[in-house]
Image: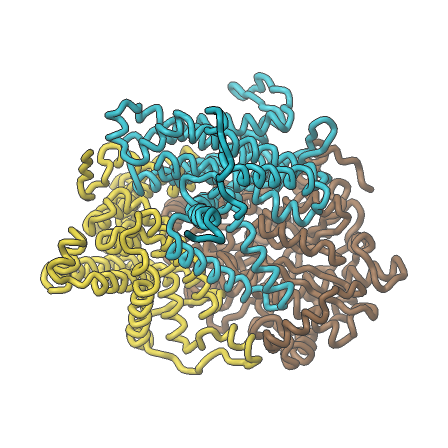
Chain colours: A brown, B yellow, C cyan
Amino acid sequence: MKYKLGTMAVAAMMAASPVMADLVFPSLSYRTGPYAAGGIPFADGYADYFTMLNARDGGIGGVMTKVIECETGYNTEKGVECYESTKGEGSLVYQPLSTGITYQLIPKTTADNIPMHTMGYGRTSAANGDVFSHTFNYPANYWNGASGAINYLLGENGGSLEGKKIALVYHNSAYGKEPIRTLQELSKKHGFEFKEVPVDHPGQEQKSQWLQIRRDKPDYVIMYGWGVMNQVAIQEAANIRFPMENFIGVWWSGSENDVLAAGDAANGYKALTFHGVGSDFPVFDDIKTHVTDAGNAAGAGDQIGTVLYNRGMYAAMLAAEAVKTAQEIHGVADINAAQMRDGMEALEITEEKMAALGLPNFGPSFKVSCQNHGGDGLVGVTQWDASSKTWSLISDFAPSDMDVIGPLIEEDSAAYAAENNIESNC
Amino acid sequence: MNEQLAYTIEVFANGLMAGVLYALVALGFVLIYKASGIFNYAQGVMALFAAMTLVGIQNGQVPFAHLINAIFGTDVHKFGWHVHSFLAIALTVLVMIALAWMVQRFVFRHLVGQEPIILFMATIGLAYFLEGVADLMWGSELKALNVCASEGACLPQGMNVWLEGTTYEALGYGFFIDNLDIVASIVAVILVAGLVIFAQYTKQGRAMRAVADDHQAALSVGVSLNFIWVLVWSLAGFVALVAGIMWGAKSGVQFSLSLIALKALPVLMLGGFTSIPGAIVGGLIIGVGEKLFEFLIGAPFLGGATENWFAYMLALLFLVFRPQGLFGEKIIERV
Amino acid sequence: MFYREAGDFRTTYAEDQQTFPIKFDRYRYYLVLFIAIVVVPFVVNDYWVNSLLLPFLIYAIAAIGLNILVGYCGQVSLGTGGFMAVGAYTCYKFMTGVDIWWGGELLFRLPEFNIFFSVIMGGVMTALVGVLFGLPSLRIKGFYLAVATLAAQFFLVWLFNRVSWFYNYSASGQISAPERDIFGVLLTGPSVQPWAAYLFCLFFTITCAVIARNMTRGASGRKWMAIRDMDIAAEIIGVNPLKAKLTAFMVSSFFIGISGALFFSVYLGAVEVGEAFGITKSFLVLFMIIIGGLGSIFGSFAGAAFLVLLPVALKVVGVDWFGWPTDIVAHLQLVIVGGLIIVFLIAEPHGIAQLWRVAKEKLRLWPFPH
């Protein structure tokens, strides 16, 4: 942001008519409101990767990229406004970044023939591409997360959770309730005792919940939290001396923001992830040279390597790869939204591909197909080290229990299909 | 010791502690309402603003850095120094006093004699305004807040080990109390005692009470309304700062801090808008009531997360019997 | 010059008592209606309808409803969000067929209601709930009542989040409006024509406004205003406060329920109760009527327009025209909206409606001030 507002205004006035020959990526970001702390790094990462592509490679396949940012404040109504105002600009793929806006856009994007990518959030059953033709949630979804956490605990306990007690602390909203069904099924399968502990928005005060956990003494706590709830929960867990290494958050409860406020007490806290952490990847050097040092960073430039920045960057990378796939399929460089959808459906991320992009082992390798919009659902676990203030990946990206998740996805998407008279898409 | 009883006592004690934290927020409302009849919706945002200012000063952030960079194309973020917590608190208090003066000078001076709902509306405008200014000034990312007297002597966090150990040996069950809550309670007691002494024994305090009783009479004996109102807003700003520190220490400083005002509303309602002891007692009742309800009925039978609405229901129940709150001034209606 | 009653003779009582006794006013009103009904549907596109017109119309209904309660009857309420949620969830249940369970068995299932009647049912149910939560108003007054209505707000949101019957047992608790139509014209779902959604909401808005206008100037409105101005005095002259307050709660909640139902079914299409009908919604609608003007139907529209259109306008100017960073624009938006509220209040404490009235008075004399 080193342009002056004045010159930017003039430049914007002169370029009043949008250049349609760009690959347009709308970014429905939230840099204000209750969740701003999480929204800022994601939006920065998303924008910086495309800026880097423009500066380094001259866009994707020779066509420049353009990120249109629109502020939603995590508010559904503003999200609608953002969608309506950007969809006419040739937008290729939407990243709504909020469960509420996702639900709202699933039918709309389908009707408008624009794909939507809800990476690690949104409606889980959208993994069934048969029903949700324009919604993608690769590489992992909430139910993969729940199952991944249980699988990780199984590994810790030598393959059996018999007789263990696992509590789920969750944000009492659509998002937080997502994993309950999966965990209930898994508790039947593995014989552990499952307990739900809801926390109401915003979660500034959680004494009751943590006293309850202190009394019940669960062996493990899984958390699906977001915003201020995370920081308070980690602090309260530390207060009751719950062992941090038995406390696992989903990926939205596992950024620097969530643990920094608690200081040393958060040491050992674990979180799920579907992408790499840290800034130790070649691609960040490119971002530094072409974006930060050139003064084109979307934010202050100090977020590089943080979990949410990496996630935003990863989302941008997946979008860019989908564009490349679409360009190959259709043989045109300047693709449209419908072609982008085909590209996303044929997307395949392999180890070699990621290494070539400067992101070796950054995320799981997966393959999207017409039936499967959710990828393979590989989930890794990271752990926080409070003294060095870094996250580190402590497990491989391991598969989740599709025997349990598959039928649940089938059931939920079938209900949606029946309610909306959707015929098979594949 | 019976386990269920021990749990209940523990919940009760923690409810009391939570109640003190609620009361801290409620105090700010009461101060302003009592002296000027303004229901200050912006109290929560003032707590956020104060906490953000405190952290900003501590870390030597350049105010409005983002805006300055955007306009002038510069790249400034920090002054590069760290300010001692106490000095930073003192500076923040100065900022809050300046804010109080500005609020009085530019807003409420022009609205003297308006209906309560219009004054309320003005504070809503103020809340929007302050929220925007706070974000522009210090940025909307999350900031960790830590008040330290010296290196290593910061606000304590975590379980009080001594209490747990002692009670475990004496009663067979170690009770949990958060150290931060204990500090908050002590601070709240000092704050309330200070306010009461100030109101009872100083000249300005007496003038303040006179204004609260009757504006016109106070004016006629030579009390400067303007001064008193600035004073009251400054005090409310100070209380907001204290509340901001106590809540912000746990959760970090971010937008959600302004939502603590919602926790204070049932307290106000129950204790009465015009009574300082009411805010404390109301806070304790709400804190204990909602925690006990969640423990005994909410979590086992209703699926949990009942605290938010139960606090209001409890207050509503009290109001049905005492429509002016427990300690509020009796509403006398004449035709 | 234009706006005056000279030469505008009224010879019957009916003429004298009409809503717009001045000819110019009346023609202006007809013109606005004409443009809204006949012209606008042909020129609007998705963007205008979904981001500006629908929220404006729907918030206007909610604002009219709340204005009846706060502006006319003097009972401050902060339960609007919760009441809108009642409207939305009722509408959803009736749209998808209400299922009644008894002892774990499905007793029977009502047939799916037409969207029009679902919306109406949303209003009716909300009216009932509103009366229930209006009962404390007989004891509690002023800001105490405002805070007491928050109990309704938080309880209702919790209830809809907790009881899965309300969202047909879906996994996440979101409700989504399935496709429904009237006479073959789609009104909900993604493929709705913008004009259809617009006209549907416009119909409800106009009907509500006309009903509200006529109620507030009739006997019931006078009773409400008597209660507002001084309830003891009103009681002495024979106004039954129980009846007056509860009817105010009922009518107000009916409108708010309708707006909630439209908000869910036509405007958003999918909502989650905590996010869409949270406490911020209650405050937002209250802000609208205070800015617009308490005790004025026009004020409800003006306030809704102010708070719906201004942020969008500021965003368009800041981001699209000047190309400023979105976060700075969003923050400036707050500063400007907050500042404008204060400036407005200082200039005219009784809201935009009063400004309008003053302007009309001035216009009657213009250009000859004496």
Q: Can you say which quadrant of the picture contains the C terminus of chain B?
A: top left
Q: Is residue A395 or residue B156 the one in the foreground?
A: B156
Q: Position of residue C351 (x, y in %)?
A: 42, 49
The answer, for residue A406, to whether it is visible in the render is no
Residue B283 coordinates in the image, percent (x, y): 26, 48
The residue lying furthest to the right in this view is: A331
Q: Is residue A309 left or right of residue A20?
A: left
Q: Is residue A36 visible?
A: yes
Residue in the picture at 43% in, 64% down: A261
Q: Quadrant of residue A251?
A: bottom right
Q: How far across and down, in percent of the image, does residue A13 sit?
A: 68, 69
What residue is shown at x 66% (from left), y 58% (from top)? A397
Residue A412 in percent (x, y) is at 66, 37
From the viewer's perspective, tell me whether residue A282 is left or right of residue C297.
right
Q: Nearer the viewer, residue C27 or B55?
A: C27
In the rendered image, which quarter contains the N terminus of chain B?
top left
Q: Is residue C2 above or below residue A44?
A: above
Between C42 and C28, the one lying in front of the other is C28
